[in-house]
Amino acid sequence: MKQGIHPENYRLVAFKDMSNEDVFITKSTAKTKETIEVDGTEYPLVKLEISRTSHPYYTGQTKLVDSAGRIDKFKNKYAKFKKK
């Protein structure tokens, strides 16, 4: 391994899956502004949209994603930039 290329500021960080409220703690260098208390200890918080506990590959279940609502929201947001 090359020396001096890896970060030195590893610390325990809580990752929270926002789709199912699962929280797991691991070492990371991710910068965060929020914190969460887990078992009486406060950790920096990183919010995730999907993790191993909610991903269809790992759970074996498929989820229907409301992509139509997202597309409509995108079109409405950028309609003012439409060329005339």
Image: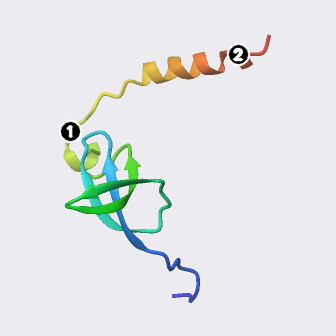
User: Residue 48, percent across and down?
Assistant: 38, 48
What is the number of callouts on the image? 2
Q: 63 or 69, which lies in front?
A: 69
State which mark lies toward you, 1 or 2. Answer: 2
Local packing at callout 1 (Cα closer than 10 Å; few below 14, some 14-19, many 20+) is: few
- Residue at x 24% of width, y 49% of height: 22
User: Residue 84, percent across and down?
Assistant: 80, 10
Q: In this view, does 63 lie to the left or right of 73?
A: left
Say what amino acid the circle numbered 2 marks: Lys
Q: Which mark is residue 80?
A: 2
- Residue at x 33% of width, y 59% of height: 14
Q: Which mark is residue 30?
A: none
Query: Circle 1 sits on which residue?
Result: 61
- Residue at x 44% of width, y 19% of height: 68
CB within 8 Å, label 1 to label 2: no
Can you name the residue that lies furthest to the top here?
Answer: 84
Secondary structure of the residue carrying tag 1 is loop
Q: Is residue 76 above or below residue 45?
A: above
Can you name the residue that lies furthest to the front here?
Answer: 40
Q: Is residue 19 above or below residue 71?
A: below
Q: In this view, does 29 lie above or below 59?
A: below
Local packing at callout 2 (Cα closer than 10 Å; few below 14, some 14-19, many 20+) is: few
